[in-house]
Amino acid sequence: MKVLKRAIKPKTYISFLYIYKTTWGTAGDICLIRESVANSQKKAKFVGHKVQLVLPISMERDTISIRTYADLSVDIPIIKVAGNIGDGHPKEHPEEWEAYEGIDEEVAITALKPWGFKLIEPND
């Protein structure tokens, strides 16, 4: 039996900043959504930066909920890449981002770079 080798083509992802309120203030995550999924959402527009990455779909283990015009909630698969660890608005702390568990450092750097954010060194 002959094994066929196929190149995995990179897909376009949108790197976007997801800001939300918490009990202690404002928090933020840098997330990735496949451009094809983002474009299929008629009532939602994802503003961010396009990046080309080769990632397995199994990394899309998180979701965000979006309300539709009929007051229905739709869950959209995303990849949470990094979270802001500073106090206050995430854009005020561009050097305080930490990659989530299971996210490769190179993927996190690629997603953060267009925003001008930097990844902190992990504490080993």
Image: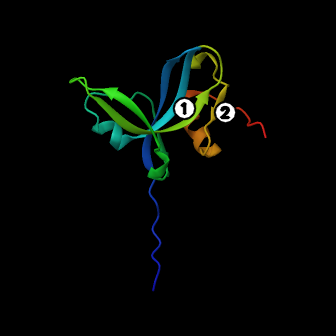
The N terminus lies in quadrant = bottom left
- Report crowding for label 2: few under 14, some 14 to 19, many 20 or more residues within 10 A (C-alpha): some
Q: Quadrant of residue 122?
A: top right
Q: Is residue 48 left or right of residue 23?
A: left
Q: Quadrant of residue 93?
A: top right
Instruction: Point out the tag, 2 or 1, that comes first from the N-terminus.
Output: 1
Question: Colour scheme of this structure image?
Answer: rainbow
Q: Label 1: which residue?
A: 114
Q: Secondary structure at mark 1?
A: helix
Residue 27 seen anywhere in this rendered image of the structure: yes
Q: Quadrant of residue 110?
A: top right
In the image, what residue type sits under mark 1?
A: Pro
Residue 21 image position (x, y, % from top left): 50, 16
In the image, what residue type sits under mark 2?
A: Leu
Tell me the tag on residue 119. Answer: 2
Residue 102 image position (x, y, % from top left): 60, 46
